[in-house]
Image (cartoon, rainbow, N blue to C red):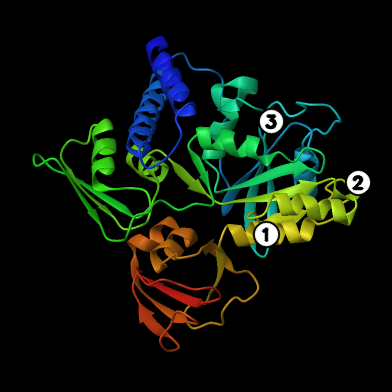
Amino acid sequence: MANIEEQIKEIEDELARTDYNKKTQHHIGKLKAKMARLKDEQELRRSKGPKTAGYAVKKSGNATIAIVGFPSVGKSTLLNKITNAQSEVAAYKFTTLTVVPGLMEHKGAKIQVLDLPGLIKDASKGKGRGKEVLSVVRSADMILLMIDVFETNIQVLVDELKTANLRLNQAPADIVIAKKNRGGVIVNFTTKQSTLDEELVRDMMNEYGHINADIVIRDDITEDQLIDYISGNRIYIPAIVTINKTDLVTPQYLKQIEKRLKGWKIVPLCAEKGIGLGPLKDAIYDALKFIRIYMKPQGREADLVEPLVIKESSDIGMVCDAIHRDFRKNFRYAQIWGKSARFPGQIVGLEHKVRDQDVVTVIVKR
């Protein structure tokens, strides 16, 4: 382990003293790939070591969100306001020493909300039980980054999440790698690249042990995006920011904070007084990209009161899974009314993609 740590430290030092330009681009790309590989190896070795007591949370509802923030920003107060949970609240740091789940109901969706211990600098290295906290965050469907108006350095949280291989509000690069037995690494770009060329991609692939492979890159990407894809252990997750205790500052001060956080979806609130909870619930719902499907039993009227809430881009097979585990197995056909139907009552199969507010009848074998 010490040897790996020394190698990582040497690479970090070299990267810190090397200016990025056209001449150093290849060298830096190779160094980044080597460091990422060493860190993955380091984490693998640690995972095989003695186990520490972690946080176990059984997922429930249509989705799970994790409240991530510094200690004492109001996470527990917010959980108690928007869910049925009762998380201990106090005006001192590290009140929450375990994960407290609660259930929030909004627009027909049941959303599990997790109140986590405060995240601090170097949490990804284990400080403040950070590794256990981050392992829970990795299993969530969305992250709610919570800060208060007097501690707005959100980059500390983002950096810790990034070190834990979480990528916020990003999508994986459009890359395909096909391994082969011989012939070296063949690189194909389908779009013009701003930073990469074939030689650099080949060298970075080799650093990760890909000696014989065909790689097709369809996006204009950076070295870091290529490393993320090759590593294969990155988690891409939506995130929004909520600023708490906004009742303590002027609107002008709040606008300055929002300007500094440009690019983020931001929801101001005062959790203690219940101000801004409605917009926050809407923002969470929208970020999770839910759609509502109304079920219509055969020969009867559709239930327009209680929708079936599922994720965007779901198909009829996923609708079946949400109803009952036997529905997919015994599926015959479905009928659709709504935006996804070419005509009312269209008969479709399991692969048909549904859209928001479709009405669906599922016919199963008896």
Report the mark closest to the observer, 1 or 2: 2
Furthest-top residue in view?
2
Is 83 drawn above or below residue 49 in the view shown?
below
The amino acid type of the residue labelled 1 equals Ala
Residue at 91 percent of width and 46 percent of height:
248
Q: Which mark is residue 117?
A: 3
Report the mark closest to the observer, 3 or 2: 2
Looking at marks 1 and 3 on the same chain, the residue that comes earlier in the sequence is marked by 3
Q: Could you tell me which quadrant the N terminus lies in?
A: top left
Q: CA distance from mark 3 to mark 2?
A: 24 Å
Q: Residue 168 vs residue 230: left or right?
A: right
Q: Residue 208 vs residue 292: left or right?
A: left
Q: Residue 246 vs residue 224: left or right?
A: right
Residue topped by disc 2: 248
The amino acid type of the residue labelled 3 equals Pro
Nearer to the camera, 46 or 189: 189
